[in-house]
Image: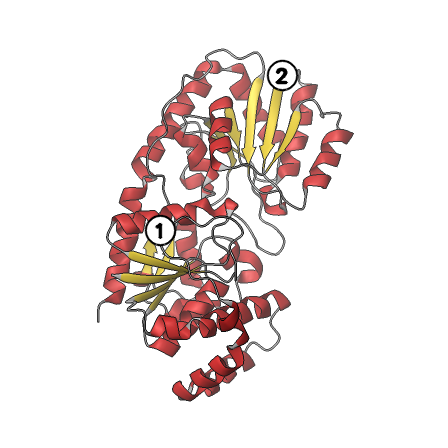
Amino acid sequence: MKVAYFVEWFPKLSETFIQREIEGLLAHGIEVEVFPYAAMPRREVPPAFPVHYARKLEVSGLPLAALRELRRCRGGPGEALRLVAGHASMRPESWYMTLMGVLTALVHAERIRGGGYRLLHAAWAHGPATAAAVSSRLAGIPFSIAGHARDIYRHGGDAFLSEKLGAARFVHTTTRANVAYLQSRGARADAIVLARRGLPGLPERVGRRVEVDRLRLLSVGRLVPKKGHHLQVEACRMLRERGVPFHLRIVGGGRLRRQIAGQRNRAGLGAQIELCGALGQAEVQEMYRWADVAIHSGVIEENGDRDGLPNVVPEAMSHALAVVVPRTPGVAEAVEHDRSGLLFEPGNPESLADALARFASDDALRLRRGGEARAWVKEHFMLARNAARLAGAMRRAASP
């Protein structure tokens, strides 16, 4: 069965889980072809499956393509105008996502129509889902969408989220918290597919340090507000005041790098907190092997943006790393307090420092929690099992 899979950028360093999901679908007999917004790849594209970037000739021919599709799609212009009229005051970000989705659909309309696709699937519920929904209308092929984090929570999702959720054959998500939210936004309960992402296998287990004189802390995530890196710096300041030796490595690039570096330097933690920048997968895996404890400190922003279950959390857990995460929906589904890790109160650096200090003072506890974390991943976060669930939903959605 052939599926057109809509994304924003591909491949993207911070979204390696997308490539893993596609590879999992391929292993279950789903023939995937990827359709990004981007006209050109940001980095080398893996050869395992086709990726269709918009060619310059196709982009320059957009006006003619739009006229051609208008002739084909009777009633479509009126339907589109009625939809837009109901959301005329939407945010600029929503206008941008909608425009990119529509343009992507127009650029690839002929390829989608004649490509033998049985289903159109969007990896995200904002612009890619708009591309899938419009392509579905133009080509008469059913579509499905996925909704996970920023795409459904930031400002409540884009202006057309509820319409897309209601029209999709199914909606894929990865946490129970998202299931409840998506239902509240218009997704039918029987159309929601809960299938976590996953890892292709467990990494080789390394011998964790039994006794530590200085706790090695690791944080992996883009330097953006919802990751809450400022909490990590403040918690580290508190650890130093308590006399707890540590070294924190923060892996990730982003617009807050200068701000985080400034906070670190003002606290006099330049020797204890290392900003490593964005790293490739092999280097990140080495970081997991180096660390004693992994931290995720995500927060819910004023605009609603948040993480669901960040993939870096189960990735760290797969290495038998003890983890410390906030007590928030989504991530707390993977980390059970005092079993597969430790939870701290969201937005509270003192609570985070307390959890880290506890791991620093109890080597046996840290090792036990790391073992339980790896066991959770083995049971709940294996790609083969979760991709099978998503592949089954795709086959059902493509059936007449």
Q: Residue visible at 57% across and 55% down?
A: 304
Residue 88: % across, % down: 59, 78
Whether residue 247 is situated above or below residue 332 in the rendered picture = above
Quarter containing the N terminus: bottom left
Q: Secondary structure at mark 1?
A: helix
Earlier sequence position, callout 2 versus callout 1: 1
Is 314 in front, or is 276?
A: 276
Q: Classify mark 2: residues with Cα within 10 Å, few (<14), some (14-19) or many (20+).
A: some
Q: Mark 2, mark 1: which one is toward the viewer? A: 1
Q: Residue visible at 48% across and 69% down?
A: 104
Q: Residue visible at 47% across and 36% down?
A: 281
Is 322 in front, or is 130?
A: 130
Whether residue 261 is situated above or below residue 3 in the rendered picture = above
Where, by quadrant of the figure, is residue 229 drawn?
top right
Residue at the disc numbered 2: 245
Residue at the disc numbered 1: 22
Disc 1 marks a residue whose amino acid type is Ile
